[in-house]
Image (cartoon, helix red, strand yellow):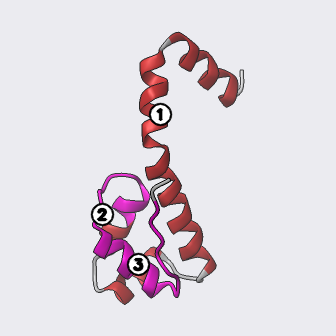
Amino acid sequence: MNYNSIKNKTFSENPAVKAEYDQLGPQYEAIRAAIASRKSAGLTQKQLAEKMGTAQANISRFENGNANPSLDFLQKMASCMGKTLHVSFE
């Protein structure tokens, strides 16, 4: 069995797991985008943290999904990577 077949089997057997997975989707999408942006900017977590004036552990917690960052934190992160933060409601 591969990951997708296990995931689909779990979702079909337990709709609550699928609902939680779907609810976390936007959070993980933001994390993936931030990691990709950091890497494309050629920055390590430590370098980004130094530019932001924060601890490397804060970047790590965010990238591992163990933090709920403020919009100010995300805006500062984007700016330090030479990016613009966009938030939308669709």
**Residue occupying the point 47% across, 33% down:** 21
Apparent side of residue 54 relative to residue 43 in the rendered image (left or right): left
Q: Nearer the viewer, residue 54 or 13?
A: 13
Q: How busy is the neighbourhood of tag 1: few (under 14 within 10 Å), some, or many (20 plus)? A: few
Q: CA distance from mark 2 to mark 3?
A: 10 Å
Dot label at residue 21 = 1
| Viewer-proximal residue among 56 and 89 | 89
Q: Which residue is at the far front?
A: 90
Q: Which residue is mark 3?
A: 77
Query: Label 3: how many residues lie within 10 Å, few (<14), some (14-19) or many (20+)?
Result: many
- Residue range in magenta is 60-88
Amino acid on which disc 2 is placed: Pro
Identified at 49% across, 25% down, the residue is 18
Q: Is residue 15 above or below residue 60?
A: above
CA distance for labels 3 and 1: 26 Å
Residue 72 percent coordinates (x, y): 29, 75
